[in-house]
Image (tube, grey):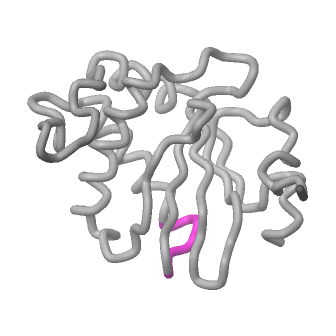
Amino acid sequence: MERIKSFSVNHRQLKKGIYVSRTDGDILTLDVRMTEPNNEPAMDPKAAHTIEHIGATWLRNSEIARHVIYWGPMGCMTGFYLIVRDLDFEAAIPYVKEALSVVRDWEGPIPGAAPEECGNYTYMDLPKAKESAKHFLDAELEYEYHYLEGNEEAK
């Protein structure tokens, strides 16, 4: 099988930040790297699930709701992908930061954390989600409007 492009990105060089992962016509995929791969601990999966629920709910109720296609965690638990349509990189950054600020400051029930709304509704950890969001927001972040190194397909 052919090696996929995301495995060609040198993960030893990635820092916490927001990057362009790829573009497909009017669709932009952002790499929201919450931890430094292979250098910092990955997110707790329960925390990532909680961030997914709160972040997706907030983004789909924000001013960019009509642009949002997907917000979800990377399998390696080092970040999230935000996929948007008809929205540029610079316009998306404040919404990513705000979504994570909402997670950091969240009080109350987690959206969609009920058995009729989620297939694993008890697999949540709000305190760890808040800690992960704070870890990202308190860092000196990279904001790179270029494709991740090795992602030649996206160029």
The quarter of the image holding the C terminus is: bottom right
Task: Give x and y (percent) for residue 54.
Answer: 27, 42
Instruction: Determine which quarter of the picture holds residue 26.
Output: bottom right
Task: Give x and y (percent) for residue 59.
Answer: 31, 57
Residue occupying image coordinates x 88% and y 53%: 3
Task: Give x and y (percent) for residue 93.
Answer: 50, 56
Left or right: 154 as drawn, with respect to 20: right
The quarter of the image holding the N terminus is: bottom right
Residue occupying image coordinates x 59% and y 21%: 42
Q: Is residue 59 above or below residue 77?
A: below
Residue occupying image coordinates x 12% and y 37%: 114
Q: Is residue 90 magenta?
A: yes
Residue at the far front in the pictured view:
1
Task: Give x and y (percent) for residue 6.
Answer: 77, 51
Magenta span covers which residues?
86-91
Left or right: 10 as drawn, with respect to 40: right
